[in-house]
Amino acid sequence: MAADTREPQPAQPNQLPKGVVLGKDGKPCRSCTSKRDFASWAQMTKSSLKSGSGAAAGAAVGVGTGAVAASALSTPVTPDDCPADVETLGRSTWTLLHSIAATYPKQPSVSQQSDLKTFMGTFSRLYPCWVCAEDFQAYMQKEHIQVGSRDDFGKWLCEAHNAVNVKLGKDKFDCSKWEERWRTGWKDGRCD
């Protein structure tokens, strides 16, 4: 009887750990999944690969059953030079977008308004997490982007961010303080 030389198949969707989002290619999407959930999926995949080869394979990859269980309970420490997960990507994105709002002109020209609308439209189509991208596109369809002034865009963006926070079960931010948070710094001087 010939040895089975087929490549192992990825876990089926119903076997994926909670929180793992599949990309449009049907594979787990690193940009749409937290590090913890992605690591849990990776460990599960490694575990299923080694289970067919016996205990020696587990020792070869340096993962025992205790390590698999421990990794599922704790958040893995991932080096900074690894691809961003959904949480890192989200924080970095909001920082960029709010920083753009903070430096947007008080009275933008027609050209600047057009550039910002074009940027936001393109950005929403190129965002690495496809689930997040589609959600943001839908938000922009419902709540048309406001680019008439720095304050208009800053408040619109703050409300967009709050809409995401609500979906994630996070607190809403007081949008009357968006400029203090992202442009001028807090009045108590801690940003000086």
Image (cartoon, rainbow, N blue to C red):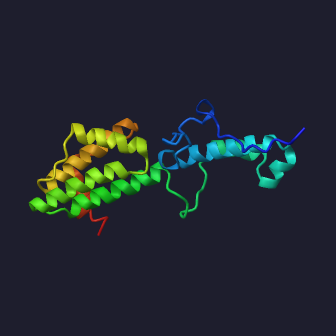
Name the outermost residue toward the right. 1
Towards the viewer: 116 or 84: 116
Res. 133 in view: yes
Towards the viewer: 20 or 12: 12
Res. 107 in view: no
Q: Is residue 60 left or right of residue 20?
A: right
Q: State how many labels appear.
A: 0
Give the quarter of the image for residue 9.
top right
At which x and y percent is residue 123? 32, 53
Name the outermost residue toward the front. 2
Name the outermost residue toward the bottom. 192
Residue at image location 81% in from the left, 48% down from the top: 58
Q: Quadrant of the C terminus?
A: bottom left
Q: Is residue 23 left or right of residue 142?
A: right
Residue at image location 54% in from the left, 64% down from the top: 81
Q: Quadrant of the N terminus?
A: top right
At which x and y percent is residue 157? 24, 49
At which x and y percent is residue 70? 69, 44
Q: Is residue 30 left or right of residue 110?
A: right
At which x and y percent is residue 129? 43, 47
Residue at image location 55% in from the left, 49% down from the top: 35
